[in-house]
Amino acid sequence: MTDSGSLDLRDTLDGLTPARIATLYRRAPLLRKTDNPERLWASFEASSLVLTVWDGGRIVGLARVLTDGIQTAVLCDLAVEPDVQGAGIGKRLIDEILERLPGVELILRDSTLSTGFYERLGFAPVENAWVRKA
Ligand SMILES: CC(C)(COP(=O)(O)OP(=O)(O)OC[C@H]1O[C@@H](n2cnc3c(N)ncnc32)[C@H](O)[C@@H]1OP(=O)(O)O)[C@@H](O)C(=O)NCCC(=O)NCCS
């Protein structure tokens, strides 16, 4: 079993490419628009924080956040490679985000695959959230 603490955590876009991101999202799976590499990459460049976890040269986890750094943060994407899910990588990414953003409310869109994960990490569902879908 992979020990998440022994893996490298990066906070830069070094080593990332649109193709690598699309592959991770397809495999996790995380439903995101990945068919336009330029737009996908632009969304990463415009993000406040991108954290990645690496097992050697392989990216095994990724979190992408938009935030004002004061009040509100949106966890846009969180994905972990299927063969290392359950090894603490998702928790490590969330812990790192919370440590870097003390006092900031972290909001996200859940999927049926991950409800138990967020519950386990102390997130609470809200009923007053609205989405205007693009
Ligand atoms: C959801 C996801 C990010 C979790 O990452 P992970 O690295 O597998 O999770 P971790 O190993 O860090 O789990 C942390 C804790 O949550 C629990 N957990 C993880 N996924 C869970 C799930 N789906 N349901 C219930 N508990 C879960 C783990 O058992 C662990 O509990 P522990 O502290 O008692 O050991 C990952 O499984 C994933 O990428 N899923 C597919 C994409 C997805 O759903 N992304 C989120 C969309 S909003």
Image (spheres, rainbow, N blue to C red):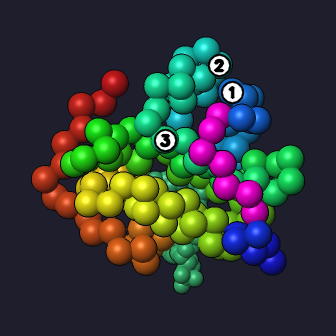
- The residue stretch that appears in magenta: 7-13
Mark yes or no: residue 12 visible. yes
Mark yes or no: residue 113 visible. no
Tag 3: amino acid: Leu
For label 2, the SS is helix
Q: Is residue 37 above or below residue 50?
A: above
Q: Residue furthest left?
A: 128
The mark lying in front, picked from 1 and 3, is 3
Q: Residue 79's spot in the image, x, y percent? A: 59, 52
Label 3 beta carbon within 8 A of ligand 1: no
Q: Pointer 1: residues within 10 angstroms few (<14), some, or many (20+)? A: some
The residue singled out by tag 2 in the image is: 37
The residue singled out by tag 3 in the image is: 49
In reply to whether residue 8 is colored magenta, the answer given is yes
Say which quadrant the N terminus sits in: bottom right
Relative depth, front residue between 11 and 111: 11
Tag 1: amino acid: Pro
Q: Is residue 125 left or right of residue 27?
A: left
Q: Is residue 17 left or right of residue 107?
A: right
Q: Which mark is residue 18?
A: 1
Sequence order check, earlier mark of 1 and 3: 1
For label 3, the SS is strand
The mark lying in front, picked from 3 and 2, is 3
